[in-house]
Image (cartoon, helix red, strand yellow):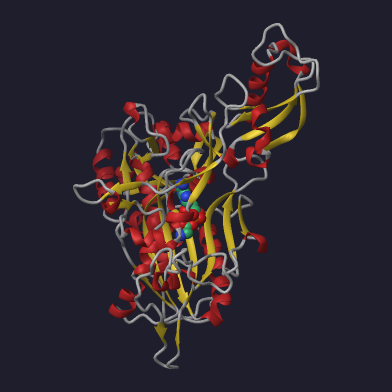
Amino acid sequence: MEKLVSLCRRRGFLFQSSEIYGGLNGFWDYGPLGVELKRNLKDAWWRDMVAAHDDLTTHAGAPGAYEMTGLDCTIIMHPQVWKVSGHYDLFADVLVECKESKKRYRYDQVRCRWIDGTGMHLPGSDQQYATEQVKYLIATVAENEAEDLEKRAMKLLKVRSKDKDSLKWIDGVTTLDQIDTQDFDKVFAPEATKLGTFGEPRDFNLMFESHAGALQSEDNKVFLRPETAQGIFVNFKNVTDSSRVKVPFGIAQVGKSFRNEITPRNFTFRSREFEQMEIEFFCHPSQSQDWYKYWRDRRMAWWQSLGLSGKNLILRDHHPDELSHYSTGTADIEYAFPFLPEGEYGELEGIAHRGDFDLRSHMEGKLDPNSCPLTVQLGEDGKPVHRGSGRDLTYRDDITNERFTPHVIEPSAGADRGALALLCEAYHEDTAPDDKGQDQTRVVMRFHPRIAPVKAAVFPLVKKDGMPEIAQDLYRALKKKFPAFYDEKGAVGRRYRRQDEAGTPYCLTVDGQSVQDQTVTLRDRDTLEQVRMKLDDVVEEIERRVTGSC
Ligand code: GAP
């Protein structure tokens, strides 16, 4: 992972936000190559899900033909949207605060391990030893967990490096939320110097707040959206009234979302500002199970089509115990990100059957997610805790005349996590011959050609004898179709290496023969195969290879 992070910075895929001021935790900027990669990912999604969707054909696995359309909603919406959706009351993580360091941690992300302190130095004392049986809980949030736990235990018990084998660990590593809060006095918090500094766990709402208008009061408090989905639900009526879409149909949206994550970590995986690619698919309740299965498989196949096809990608169905009772299914598409322990996967996309929960909430008022059947959550005064819009968000089928509240299937993907998975999957080290024919280790980003930031690079072998002129004309012709790069500096082998690191699938070299017979060599990034072809055929051939790979 460190090698990938360093490559991302060095080659301009990703930078820490505001880096010259020390960076801002949880915020990332995409550099010249990164912006192309992420844009290609979002464009591929939009094209495959919306723009190129054929609504006259029944696609493999689908219960029938369907329509797709799009939206682009504001990031700040009426605050009632978040009250009714449940985010205002329920969108919280549980955190613990260390009273000494003032640092806050996600309760379920503090990792800890019991250690036997019997006979060892008493914490805080150089002379006294624990005569009775005593144990402590060493806590860490460090990525090098095992090392940090050992270091912290040695610090607490005043054990020298040479004696570290005398540490007596009890059981394996667990998380703090598995520990009885009665035992908090025995916890050695990650950045504390003494025991028992954690306060009681408490809820922390993840929505960023701001104020709309000149005054800063409760009345004009607004929130940055934590998901793009709600913009789609509140526009359901606008879309059905203004376009001719008929159920079943989907509304897609790509856009920024914001979550004030307590512990942003693992590069861009858990960021505070990120982009989502979400679809809300509206269907008849009787068909919702079939549509759920369709979307679950379709989305998995889509990620595979972009090159995440190996054992690193899995589809995990949620266990019935994990589901809210109004949902009859949720599945996660997960990727084995290299920063995770062996055998663990991180969520790339969730596909959820949401029933009629969202449309009904925006009609009737915030529903109690624990009620069965779903009912509006009422306050002590017998009125809804959060009022709905009162607008009719039901749908009338104009053939059967049936009126119903559509059920929703929600495939919700992260563009940043997607880009990160593509970067992880692409990173390879292999050997390739240098200019002298000697095999050298090379770093190569094996992006699928469709999402590669630059599709082709053009090199004149030398900067004279008419080669640059031919190469520049070729570069201009390619540039009209897709991102291309021209490079005439340095040995040609080094130029290939730079493109391999950028993930450019094809390099074209103009040499002495090109001047004679109007041919160039085309080098394939992955096979290293070089073929000579007519200059006039190059643009078409690259286009064929890039689009043919879709
Ligand atoms: N509307 C449903 C929803 O937002 P989610 O599982 O909370 O569901 C969907 O988010 C996707 O958004 C995730 O699968 C992930 O790819 C991305 N995502 C969520 N939180 C993120 C974060 N803090 N940083 C980066 N991506 C995130």
In the orientation shown, which residue stands out farthest toward the bottom? 400
Query: Residue shown at 28%/53% (left/top)?
Result: 219
Quadrant containing the N terminus is: top right
Q: On screen, 221 above or below 96?
A: below
Which one is nearer the viewer's eye here, 323 or 53?
Answer: 323
Which one is nearer the viewer's eye here, 151 or 471?
Answer: 151
Looking at the image, can residue 447 be seen?
A: no
Quarter location, residue 121: top right
Residue 256 on image: x %, y %: 36, 52
Query: Residue shown at 23%/42% (left/top)?
Result: 469
Quarter location, residue 402: bottom left
Residue 398 on image: x %, y %: 39, 91
In the orientation shown, which residue stands out farthest toward the left? 214
Q: On screen, 351 above or below 419?
A: below
Q: Is residue 363 left or right of residue 136?
A: left
Which one is nearer the viewer's eye here, 401 or 422?
Answer: 401
Which one is nearer the viewer's eye here, 349 or 120?
Answer: 120
Q: Is residue 529 left or right of residue 161?
A: left
Residue 487 on image: x %, y %: 32, 37
In the orientation shown, which residue stands out farthest toward the front? 381
Residue 140 on image: x %, y %: 60, 30
